[in-house]
Amino acid sequence: GEGRFERIGWDEALDEIAARLEGIVREHGGEAVWPYWGTGTLGYLQGLEGNSGRRFFNVLGASAHYANICSAAGNAGMAEAVGSPGGMDPEDLAHAGLVLLWGTNPLTSGHHVWKFVQEARKAGAHLVAIDPVRTRTAQQADEHLAPLPGTDAALALGLLNVIVGLGAQDEGYLARHTLGWEEFRGRIAEFPPERAAEITGVPVERIVALGERIARTRPTAIRATQGLQRHSGGGSALRVIAGIPAVTGDWARRGGGVAFSTSGHVRLNKAALWRDDLRRGPVRTLSMTRLGEGLLDVQDPPVKALFVIAANPAGSTPHQNKVRRGLARDDLFTVVMEQFPTDTVDYADIVLPATAQHEHADLHEGYGHLYLTWNEPAVAPPGECLPTTETFRRLARRMGLDEPALYDSDESLAEQLLASDHPWMAGITLDRLRKEGFVRMSLPDPFLPYAEGFPTPSGRFEFRSEGAGLAGYVPPVEVADEERARRFPLALISAASHEFLNTQFANNPELRRRSGGLTVRLHGDDAKARGLSDGQRVRVGNDRGAFEAVLKITDQVRPGVAATTKGHWAKLAGGANANAVVDERDTDLGGGPVFHDTRVEITGLP
């Protein structure tokens, strides 16, 4: 953890890694090796989407890695409702009469969609932001509702109560294309606006007014992204929100529906890229957001080697102190592939210099658009940096592995990935991508994926699913815990920074200056109750840990909520960041993290 290193050459590094991996596999089995991919790059060749090096780890028999840190709960919730994580085409927001930006801040973390929001507004659409914090986006909206973190499903049910009370449901669409409507209608009846207001903290008249607006505005489009589903009921929240356009029939209209992710519509040949058939048998799966547990508690076998690829878990994963204890184990062999000396690098045994996006070839999809893109290297790699693909080819050769698939070139890997027989991939070749740069998938125009049915077991939108029962409100575990609220009265939101991309760029001095450092925003009433003043240095903590920040008193945050930003490097921010207070719990669906289901108390520092 001290970050002290001596320079060695590639040959020595590969020899050491090969010897250590061979010894660990021989003594403990392949599952003692954990390849840990993160979102430092989402490329199919060099990063997370393709699990770069996955073929190599399959040959070793390594543990599988569950990359659940971003959108697992929402993906699972959408899949239970509509049969896929994929929602409406975000470009069709331009055709909406009403746009709800729900738990999303595109002016900071999703700029590409703002163009289509603006087009809708020019045509007369009303824009509503739903967020516990009055973000940059909320400040630009016509209307802002600020629910307590994790209560979004209750708000959605309250809105639906108003819609159904006005008789604005589309009975024809419901009869033809949904399953479990009468049961779900009973669930809606349990959430009159008054109850929704009590749970969410949103005034009842605001709930009624927005419900009435949705009832009379066709189509209504909802943009909901990752922040919304990072709490204990995150999967259920997306299920219920996806039910709004099912009730109004807007899934059948251009400009209607929910835009959560588009990745469910991408039909590349991932199996050909991953080659899981190279495993000799089944292997266990380890969750990236439970890294502390995986390193300290998992046995049979224990994790003895950690290979960190495009990730900075010491700065990005929950329960930071527990993660650090795991990374500090003397008997853990840790290899980190990086460009910069991150918090995680400080715990590595060997650091391998990796290329950045403009220095290597890669193929990308998007989870906020419907295009595939080819990333041609713009410059040669600096120094001794290697693409991740090349690093694993060299390591496989050093270990004497004779599987031919381990040595495929980047171009060959891309071609295998693109070799899909799905009609949405028709006509998209590597040659075309290299010539054009980006290509929209071969989708119908307009693309209304659920106008005439859903890829669920029933072929219908499922208010009730076999896997998850009837959709409804699942309260946030910590935010709704009255006993915990007495000890830690403030619900913490740790949203995206305007200057950083997760922990990327957080070591850049100018961007750190612009960010103002690690701050926490608090409503004036909450600050006054604690005797705190603006600009004061404070401790934000609970029974898991704490971080220090500068207090900003503002009405941008509703009472009872503290707002900070993620991504700050702990070693550049006083030794900890917001993840020091977040628990290693899972969401209701998908096993996602609960970054926004956290209670803290704030106290002044001398």
Image: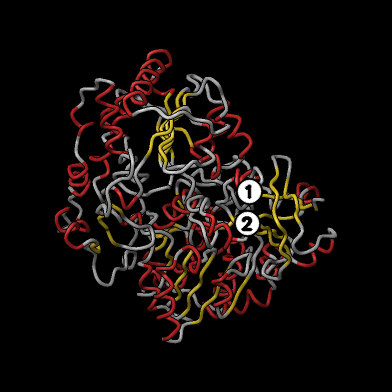
In this view, the residue farthest toward the top is 27
Read off the residue under disc 1.
Answer: 573
Q: Secondary structure at mark 1?
A: loop
Tell whether label 2 touches label 1 (CB within 8 Å): yes
- Give the image quarter of residue 445: bottom left
Q: Is residue 318 left or right of residue 391?
A: right
Give the percent coordinates (x, y) of residue 24: 41, 17
Q: Is residue 43 above or below residue 498?
A: above
Q: Which residue is mark 2?
A: 517
Check disc 2: other Cα within 10 Å, few if <14, some if 14-19, many if 20+.
some
- Residue, x 66% and y 49% (percent of image)? 598
Determine whether the residue tagged by mark 2 lies in a helix, strand or loop: loop
Q: Is residue 306 left or right of residue 145?
A: left
Please state, as top left, top right, bottom left or bottom right, where the N terminus lies in the image: top right
Q: Could you tell me the amino acid type at mark 2?
A: Gly
Q: Residue at the location (35% across, 75% down)?
A: 254
